[in-house]
Image (cartoon, helix red, strand yellow):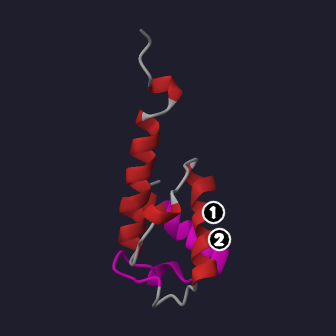
């Protein structure tokens, strides 16, 4: 499953949104998410993807912004993971 598909599933599971209404350009404001919803959803994303999201770096407006940010955090944290570290 792609990042977009996984995020859409999280949106549907958590907020009971209609998946057809979740497009890359859909804004979180349009979905009616307040700041508490966004914070709680950020924790759901961390659990789903096994990442840690620095609060100050998770400034997203659209679902595509969220996909891009998650992909970036996954890549960065995979590269910094101990299993990828080279031994000397």
Q: Which mark is residue 19?
A: none
**Magenta stretch containing residue 78, yes or no?**
no
* Local secondary structure at mark 1: helix
Q: Which dot marks residue 40?
A: 2
Estimate how packed mark 1 is, as few (under 14), some (14 to 19) or many (20 or more) residues with alpha carbons within 10 Å.
some
Asked whether the viewer can see residue 16, the reply is no
Residue at screen point 56% across, 85% down? 33
Give the CA distance from mark 2 to mark 1. 7 Å
Instruction: Give percent across and percent down for residue 9.
Output: 56, 67
Residue 83: x and y in percent read 51, 24
Camera-nearest residue between 39 and 71: 39
Q: Is residue 43 left or right of residue 2?
A: right
Along the viewing direction, whichever of 55 and 67 lies nearer the viewer:
55
Determine whether the residue tagged by mark 2 lies in a helix, strand or loop: helix
Label drawn at residue 44:
1
Q: Residue at x 36, y 69 (%)?
A: 65
Q: Which residues are magenta?
A: 6-28
Residue drawn at x 45%, y 37% is 78
Residue 68 at least partly seen: yes
Label 2–label 1 contact, CB within 8 A: yes
Looking at the picture, how far across and down is residue 40, in whole percent?
65, 71
Q: How many marks?
A: 2
Within 10 angstroms of label 2, few (less than 14), some, or many (20 or more) residues? few
């Amino acid at each position: 499953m792609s990042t977009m598909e996984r995020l859409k599933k999280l949106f549907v599971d958590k907020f009971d949104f209609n998946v057809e209404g979740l497009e890359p350009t859909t804004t979180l404001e349009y979905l009616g998410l307040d700041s508490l919803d966004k914070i709680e959803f950020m924790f759901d994303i961390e659990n789903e993807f096994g990442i840690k999201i620095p609060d100050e770096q998770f400034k997203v407006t659209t679902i595509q912004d969220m996909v891009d940010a998650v992909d970036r955090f996954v890549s960065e944290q995979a590269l910094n993971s101990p299993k990828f570290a080279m031994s000397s």
